[in-house]
Image (cartoon, grey):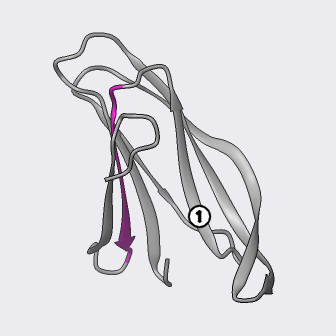
Amino acid sequence: MGENQVLRFSTGWDININGIFTGSVGQINYIPGNCQGGVCKHASANPNPVASVQLMPGEAASIDLSPIPGASGVRAVMVGNRRNVIVTAAIINTLTGETVSHIIVANTDGDIH
């Protein structure tokens, strides 16, 4: 991510599904390490949950994550009690509101589209 950009991580609970979704979002920053042969190692920093949320059917939530100073990247992780939530991630320009990049995360084991 560049300057004046955040990672907007959003989740929504389908209006047609009964029950409450309970989840937490974690932010993991990566600190650059040594490079050898063009491959650079990165170490994770602060892999802790930063927010918890409960959603009723038809509700959604989002959080904007920014890398800590000196970090080479940031990752969002969501853990919840339901498999069929809708999750998206987008890189947002904070000055213009423009979506720079958009990712839809499927609700199947590890698939990203």
Label 1 sits on residue: 74
Q: Main secondary structure of the magenta part?
A: strand
In the rendered image, the vertical position of residue 73 relative to residue 27, given as above or below: below
Q: Is residue 45 left or right of residue 15?
A: right
| Residue 23 x, y percent position in the rendering | 50, 28
Tally of numbered discs: 1
For residue 39, what is the image quadrant? bottom right
Work out whether residue 96 or residue 49 is closer to the camera in this orientation and state it.
49
Secondary structure of the residue carrying numbered label 1: strand
Q: Residue at x 16, y 18 (%)?
A: 16
Q: Position of residue 88 (x, y in %)?
A: 34, 50
Region rendered in magenta: 84-94
Where residue 43 appears, x then y in whole percent? Answer: 78, 65
Badge 1: how crowded within 10 Å, few (<14), some, or many (20+)? some
Residue 18, by quadrant, is top left
The residue sitting at 31% across, 20% down in the picture is 56
Q: Give the residue type that dot 1 points to.
A: Val
As drawn, the residue found furthest toward the bottom would be 37
Direction from residue 81 to residue 29 in the image, left or right: right
Q: Residue at x 55, y 45 (%)?
A: 77
User: Residue extending furthest front?
Assistant: 37
In this rendering, the answer to whether 107 lies above or below 46 is: above
Which residue is situated farthest in the left direction here? 16
Residue found at the very far right of the displayed protein:
34
The residue lying at 44 percent from left, 75 percent from top is: 5
